[in-house]
Amino acid sequence: MNPRVRTGTSDPALDWLNFFLADVRDGLGPYLAIYLLAVHKWEPASIGLVMTLAGVCALLTQAPAGALIDRTPSKRAVVAIAALLVTGSCLVLPWISSFGLVALTQAVGAIAGSVFAPAIAAISLGISGPKAFTRRMGRNETFNHAGNACSALLAGGLAYLFGPVVVFYLMAAMTVASMIATRRVPADAIDHEQARGLNHGTLGEHAQPVGMRVLLHNRPLLVFAVCCALFHLANAAMLPLVSQKLAQANLQLATPLTSACIVAAQLVMVPVAMLVGAKADAWGRKPLLLAGFLILPLRGVLYVLSDDPFWLVAVQLLDGIGAGVFGALFPVVVKDLTQGTGRFNASLGALSALFGLGAALSPGVAGLVVQSAGYSAAFLTLAGIAGAAFLLLLVAMPETRYAGDANAPLPAPF
């Protein structure tokens, strides 16, 4: 570990950075649709098209964003600039209403937001080093989920009292807080070679990152990429389908129950992320990943057993386990499989784009099944996709715990 690193100084700043960025990194998220519908009186089709365009922009820039983070020594500045761009793209909405301008601002926000995940992972790895990275990522996810839950509660309560425009003020406040937290991360605590996955002393004085083509021959990394894409293809549509079923059962309770689903799942993710961060080095990555992946097909099957709203909400709480495990372990496994290559963040961005593609396709696939065969068939279809992801992980994915350890054998290819 680099002697410059002052972990004790950096840890609280990173904790708060993850907490406050939770409300900033995705822009307005679901509140964008509510605002455009309620204030600007947009048609649902136009709202959906703007959100789709922003999603496509985010997908296309994930890998380049990771490559940028690998190369730049100004990681803190990148985070601060991205936070300003995301927030600014939202704060201008009260003064613009044309489709073109709104689409442009949201595309800019989506592109800027694509740097947050690799930047936070890189700063964390650069400060903690590979041996302490698992625990650090567990803390990151713990504070991220706590921040999501807190901001969702504040947004819901304040919007009820003062209207949907209040989410802009909340986001602006969180952005200022996140920039203060970024500033408090010591610049000299970040080892930038370590942050991109280069090992000190193993590649010599003139160490250079490997070519990206080498990563295409990393079979465990490719298997993990497919598993991630399938996981999100199965997962992303489940909450929207639950919301639709809640609306059919009781339209008045649909919105508060959906909000309860989101907040409660985030609260479940907090202890799950803490557990993963504390135990993944001792227990290994694969057992925890298998547990998280197994939850997903189980949820899909449980949804078809009852249409009772409170049953649906209770089953949705299981999302806190699956998503909590995946969120904490995703960058850890990528780090394991790319340690020494100098391409950690580029790989993280590329895999994020793949699972983002799966998440983008998920509602469309589920919607087609609902239209042709009903909600139960859609849940079972998603459960089948999740089951395929679990089986692929079980059969083809090696344990990666010692992949970055020069004194331990690399994981065997499948």
Image: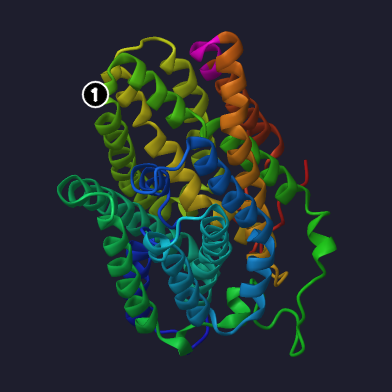
Residue 252 belongs to the span the image colors magenta: no
Q: As rendered, which of 14 and 96 lies closer to the eye? A: 96
Q: Residue under circle 1?
A: 252
Q: Most prominent secondary structure in the magenta stretch? A: helix
Left/right placement of residue 395 relative to residue 382 reads right
Q: As rendered, which of 137 and 399 lies closer to the eye? A: 137
Q: Quadrant of the C terminus?
A: top right
Left/right placement of residue 138 relative to residue 150 reads right
Image x and y of residue 228, in percent: 62, 42
Could you classify mark 1 by the number of other residues whose Cα lies within 10 Å: few (under 14), some (14-19), or many (20 or more)? few
Asked whether residue 55 is in view, the answer is yes
What type is the residue that disc 1 sits on? Gln
Q: Which residue is drawn at 39% across and 19% down?
A: 245
- 278 over 343 or under it: above or below: above
Q: Which residue is drawn at 68% across and 46% down?
A: 225
- 177 over 347 or under it: above or below: below
What secondary structure is marked by label 1? helix
Residue 375 belongs to the span the image colors magenta: yes
Read off the magenta span: 374-379
Image x and y of residue 329, in percent: 51, 51
